[in-house]
Image (cartoon, grey):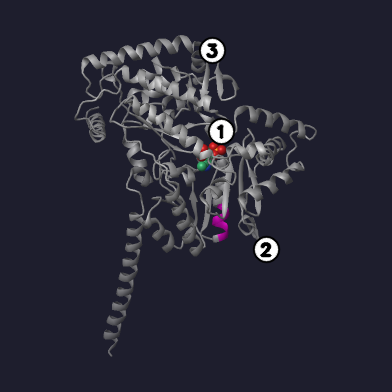
Amino acid sequence: MTTWAATTWALYGVGSAALATSLVKLRRRFDLSQAKHRSLAGHARIARRIAALLPFYEYNETRFFCSDGAPADIAARRRAGFERLSALYKTRFAATISRTAEAAESISDLVFTDAYRVPFQYRRHVQVNLPSAVFVQSSEGVTVTDLDSNRFYDASGSYGVNVLGYDFYKGAIERGASRVRELGPVLGPYHPLIIDNVELLKEISGLDEVSFHMSGTEAVMQAVRLARFHTRRSHLVRFCGAYHGWWGDVQPGIGNPVPAHETYTLAEMSEDTLRVIASRHNIACVLVNPLQALHPNASAPSDSALVDSGRRAHFDKGAYAEWLRRLREVCSAQNIVLIFDEVFVGFRLAQGGAQGYFGVHADLVTYGKTLGGGLPIGVVCGRAALMRRFRDERPADICFARGTFNSHPYVMAAMNEFLRHLRTPQGQAVYRDLDAIWNARACLLNERLRNEALPVEIANLSSIWTVCYTQPSRYNWMLQYYLRAEGLALSWVGTGRLIFSLDYTDADFVAVADRFVTAARAMQADGWWWRNASMTNKLIRRTILKEIIARRLFS
Ligand SMILES: Cc1ncc(COP(=O)(O)O)c(C=O)c1O
């Protein structure tokens, strides 16, 4: 063979190899895009770009009441209802509103939540006429009392912390404090009761080691860092819509000013996702928030995003358990660390947490919220090999994690009260027939809503509820204000998430259901759910899109 021919063959060889590599890369890229959920939440970067383009605009006072094309008589009914509600708010919640207004000028969190209670087009008019009233002075049983001495049934659940009832946590904090008073806030050395916490957590999680942090966000950060350290791989997989705290790597989309380059956001309960996890060699861990079982692939529901009636939720325990089993199999086969983030659902669904509830074991589990017995906490439990923060054979290669307030004696003591209580007959009784109780309560309320032809429906994962709307409407977010008027306290995400503590009795719950139905009835009577035959969720979204485009083009 001549030199020329040899060179040509060599070039062919290199070219074919390059082509084959490119095809493989293309195929992997294609598989990855197939495994993304088709919603915007499934495409973090695009979502961020689109969010940056969205212009602010708002409805004037007239359009506020007829943005769905309602006729004049309906708009007038809505206006009358709105004014009545506004007058009620301004008298019944006067002191609470006034204190909130003072604080809202300088508490950034409040400035933010106050702006994100309703879709932005309606914001200003709502803020002026139905002002936020966020102060409470006391809690008792399943109620909280505001500064005007109004008592509300609490459906906010303190972000999920309140599992056993406020009175329990008050006691846990007090009893706990008395046990560590002599030591006080000494940090660094431990109070001996930490040992009991560790033993109890090992038993509950079925894992070997425990680390303490100050929040759920930090627990998640540490779990992911450990997974990366031990697998020597870079990427984490999180599922579309799942919340894992506000650390950048687990919040790659809207809300985080910089892109998260080492995060894959994949569709949950998807074959394509399993295929990607099984075929990539750079995945360190897969993060699961079992709360998503209530609304797989959808973001935490908030009334500020309730622009139509598209909110959907449905819990299928068997299907989700099967998904977790398959995920477990793929992770085990690929040596990928499976992390259950039980910061929200741990201790709410079952004593053994989501692992026990769904019958699937994780390699690392994060806990938080209620585990602190009413005080701030984040915990990671894991297999010993994964929890190790250094390598015996490479002493300078470490996985650093600290935190000034980790293992604070007062937090450890309140936690111990919580964990000890779980072992008492009273603590165990709480979990007996839990799903049956809360499913029956959801059914009862749904039946009452259906019987009165109210376009509202509850979906629930045990004691965690979300309100769905059964006919197209632009005004569903108004329900949160009617519910407050009836004495139900919700969190700032409104009807997206109602969280009940497990000390609700049947009688308490009937009172809640009565108030819920009365509120929905009043909203119906005030015309907010008027619709004409042609209205659909799609049409509503198209109208909003046109408004946005017009705003961008003509202002
Ligand atoms: C599943 C999950 N993980 C992590 C976090 C973050 O916890 P924290 O707010 O304590 O930082 C939350 C908070 O809601 C959560 O629900």
Kind of residue at disc 1: Leu
The stretch in magenta equals 225-230
Q: Nearer the viewer, residue 170 or 304?
A: 170
Q: Which residue is mark 3?
A: 148
Q: Which residue is mark 1?
A: 502
What element does badge 2 sit on?
loop
Disc number lying in front (2 or 1): 1
49 to 470, vertically: above or below: below
The reply, left or right, for residue 66 in relation to residue 493 is left
Q: Between disc 2 and disc 3, whose residue precedes?
A: 3
Q: Between disc 2 and disc 1, whose residue precedes?
A: 2
Q: Residues within 10 Å of mark 2 (few under 14, many from 20)?
A: few
What element does badge 3 sit on?
loop
What element does badge 1 sit on?
loop
Image spot of residue 239 (x, y percent): 43, 48
Kind of residue at disc 2: Asp
Q: Which residue is mark 2?
A: 392
Q: Quadrant of residue 252?
A: top left
